[in-house]
Image (cartoon, rainbow, N blue to C red):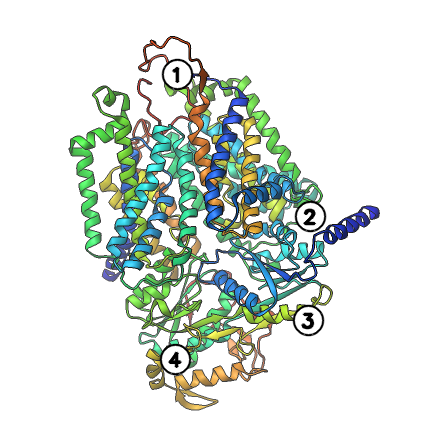
Amino acid sequence: MMRVGPFEIERRPDPPLTWILGVSLLAILAAMAMSGVIFWSYGVDPLRAYGVIIRGTLFNAKALPEVVRFAIPMLLAGVGLVLAFRALFWNIGAEGQILAGATAATWVALFSPVPDALKLPMMFIAGFVGGALWGFIPALLKLRLAVNDVISTLMMNYIALYLVSWLVHGPWKGPEMRGFAFTNEFPPAAQIPLIAGTRIHWITLVLGIALALGVAFVLARTRLGFEIRVQGESSDAARYAGIDPMRTTLLVMLFAGGAAGLAGVGEVGGIHHRLLDPNQISLGFGYAAIIVAWLARGSPVAAILTSLFLGFIFTSGDVMKVALQMPARVTDVFNGLILFWLIGSERLLFYRVRWAPGRAVREPLPVGGAGADPGPPGISGGDQ
Amino acid sequence: MRWMKTWLVVALILAFATAGPGLAQTKLKVGFIYVGPIGDYGWTHAHNQARLIAEKTLPIETLYVESVPEAQVEPFIDKLIQQGSKVVLTTSFGFMDGTLAMAKRYPNILFGHASGFKRNPNMFTYMADFYQIYYLNGLMAGALTKTGKVAYVGAFPIPEVKRHLGAFALGVRAVNPKATVNVRWLFAWFDPAKAKEATEALIAEGADVFAFTEDSPTVVQVAAKKGLPSFSHYSPMQRYAPQGVVSGQLVHWERIYVDFLSKVLAGKYNATNLQNVDYWWLLAEKAAEVGGEFGVPINPVWVSKLQAAKVNTKEFGTLSVYDLVMRRLAQMSKTPVAFDPFTGPIRDRKGVLRVPAGHTMTVLELTTMEWAAPGIVGPWPKEP
Amino acid sequence: MEEWVVNTFIRGLALGTPLLWAALGEIYAERSGVVNLGVEGMMILGAFSAFALAQTTANPLLGLLIAAGAGAAAALLHAFVTITLRANQYVSGLALTMLGLGLSALLGRRWEGLPLLDTLPEVSAFTYLSLLLAVLLWFVLYHTRWGIVIRSAGEAPAAVDTLGVNVALVRYLAVIFGGALAGVGGGFLSVAYRPSWTEGMTNGLGWIAIAIAIFASWDPLRAVAGAFLFGALFHLSFRLQTWVAPEPLQMMPFAFTIVVLALTARRGGRAQGAPAALGLPYVRGER
């Protein structure tokens, strides 16, 4: 506990949800106030800009479903990352895992003898396996050969990118698009149904929510979940508890890669209906999912909310570009500011400020000891 | 369902009727969707310049969105229409299916799609192509090479680039039958580092004249540093190498935009008669221009060298390459053209007869061209 | 054959130089315990500011100087958020990347399409200076008191804290210094390697620099090898296109990185020399 004037500042390890939401909202408001300067420098009245953004996203029948459409891939990849980060595996490779999943699904959709009725389920299974494989390789490299996970997952992204590029320019290029680098269109049986009038491929959405809930259950209620949690908090403790880090990490990365792979299936099966230039398949969802996972603070269920929030950020950027006629990169600045404010305000969450002018002042200031800072669960680790 | 539609129409009419005063005088609103940033100094930059010119010459108002991912074209079209656009122009091949879908959803809005092949009663297609100019550039390159190796840095191995490369190689061979055109592929429309290293690789291989497809002046700059001539691409790049640029390709999208939009304003084009409107505009329509700077077909620095080089042709006898370029330019600037580089007999580099004697390639053949012209050396993905 | 070796070597130096600067910066930041994934953002800010100043003053060296300042300023933000506010370093780095790419593009509109006539040669005294810098940074890191302090801040912050070292200050300085180097790396791109300005022109090189820092096991001398090797491989991926299909070639530098790491790895134990407290915020009194 600390005193600043008449205020008492106190730590609290488990902030209530309302406080988290309140502080986050304040951070977003602060970021918006700051981006007001940018709007203003482009001759756009900031207040009008905020109005246009809110109206153009949350109160617009066409744009609101787009929030969900963006949230789907980020939710799937994000849930996987929540788990990976809790096991202290720094998976920067969700982008590559998305591409791997998309590639595997494309193979099922266009080149496999799978009967129509089984196309969609097989695409999801193949996509999961593809993504899982892409996540498994760096996990194995880290566990067996101590290859740094940040670098291996990053490199795997590039490899996936050029692999897809090779497929669409070479063996898989379809005559339908007159020589441009696209495969042919998926047959109808391989297209994920959309909610009418939107681009929400609902099967993938349901999968994402189910996975989020499933992972929450596994983490809270199962032996494996316990092992992952212990490993995430301290590798020493894990060792004492007889946990095999090999097994948990491999399982976690198979799942994280697989979940990202499912996101890839959703993108090609629900949106593009073909495999195409890798930079057009995922719009950086694999990287945005890192933010989703971090904002979720280790909770897979919270990832549902945070992926929707990121979806809102994506669509609000689009509104700015069109309705305010601003350069595309304004959205990068806007997003960067929001992120900085959100993470910058994080410390606030773990303190309580109390108005207590009358209390005794002579309390000794703590020098460490009692106040071990809890930090966000799961996401505090580095490279071990 | 019908009653719903009726209500919707009534609601729409009410919405427009109550949209306030000034509706009668509002200018025609035209929305542009770009695939890259307007500052790319290539494709998107050129479209944006054309938009500004069209806005100046016609009583229209324009909106634009830059850096739109290909699969996101539909929500952006929605937003442009919500902002009041009555005409929407999309400027990337990958926007084709999305634009067509939206054209069907909004039968009263006019759509235009650059570089594609799908049309609708309310959707036309347009393209300003460079193959004739690449042929002219090839003639000059063939005269200027001392090593007999001419370089071409290609973005993607797709028909558009293959066609340009083919025309370029035919030009080179017309002047210098022993010369080769050495190719490197970047697999990127914009990547300065790749363009740079590809150029360096070609220099190391002995190439001494450079042409390319990439949205930055990198190739021009690298060649100029070694004192080697090059051909500017898409934007006026002579200013980056006043001594090095010989000529190049320049585009005038505004020719197409102004023509189409003035016909819309005059009531000649409407949402029912665009099914067969396809602009394939070249030199004769002044949609393409030869040169590295507007109004400068050949950099004066290089004129004397081209005048000194003599070439023997069937049609004109012996003449200087400079005169040959000017004659061919004049022939191709006529309507109908008096010369087309893709007139048979042409065999590909494997010896297969691709264009029979007396036949000139049709637009469809040009836009789906996959074979490699004789003289081209280097990888050729998906070579038939 | 000789031409191949010489030319590949030179190309390795040319593209390797900006990568080396950024990688050296990242090594110092990470050695002190702070991961900065915002290298791309700092590099692009450096590239923009260097070009803007070089274009205005016709002095590319001055451009590099301001690039160092721009990179340092960006890094200061990262330092404040991750050290003082103890926010997650990975997310802060991603935010910095976005902010850098966005800001540089908005500010840079005016400079797009402008030529730069006074440029720096890409292989010049500056290249040798870069090599010298790497040696110097290596020496400082391993053979001076400063180096020990920096490394300890990343290995055992609590231990050096008890010795009276201000861990936060050390980390601040290391991160800012790293940002300055990344800025110079970016500036080199826009005034020497490819003298012009276009938004997003770093195009992922910042990520490669991070990879090189890790690839080098956070050792400045090995980073020299890593950066130049990557530059050479990147160049070769175009040179070899006459014989090998382009797509597998373009994959090569990245696959090669993984393979080398796997082959040189120590079995078990910590990932090749990663600072023990890397990525962990340090709080006085916390263990």
Q: Are marks 3 and 2 in contact (CB under 8 Å)?
A: no
Residue B176 visible in this rendered orientation of the protein? yes
Q: Is residue C223 left or right of residue B342?
A: left
Residue at disc 4, secondary structure: loop
Kindly identify the amino acid type of the residue bearing the numbered disc 4.
Answer: Asn
Disc 1 residue crowd, few under 14, some 14–19, many 20+, Cα 10 Å: few
Residue denoted by label 3: B266
Disc 3 residue crowd, few under 14, some 14–19, many 20+, Cα 10 Å: few
What label sits on residue B176 in the rendered view? 4
Q: Are marks 1 and 3 in contact (CB under 8 Å)?
A: no
Kindly identify the amino acid type of the residue bearing the numbered disc 2.
Answer: Pro
Distance between mark 3 and mark 4 Cα atoms: 49 Å
Q: Is residue A191 left or right of residue B223?
A: right
Q: Earlier in the sequence, mark 3 or mark 4?
A: 4
Between marks 3 and 4 in the image, the one whose residue lies nearer the viewer: 3
Q: Nearer the viewer, residue A302 or C57?
A: C57
How far across and how far down the image is residue B101, in percent?
67, 54
Residue denoted by label 2: A188
Q: Earlier in the sequence, mark 2 or mark 1?
A: 2
What label sits on residue A237 in the rendered view? 1
Kindly identify the amino acid type of the residue bearing the numbered disc 3.
Answer: Ala
Residue at disc 2, secondary structure: helix
Distance between mark 4 and mark 1 Cα atoms: 76 Å
Residue at disc 3, secondary structure: loop
Q: Are marks 2 and 4 on the same chain?
A: no
Residue C232 visible in this rendered orientation of the protein? no
Kindly identify the amino acid type of the residue bearing the numbered disc 1.
Answer: Ala
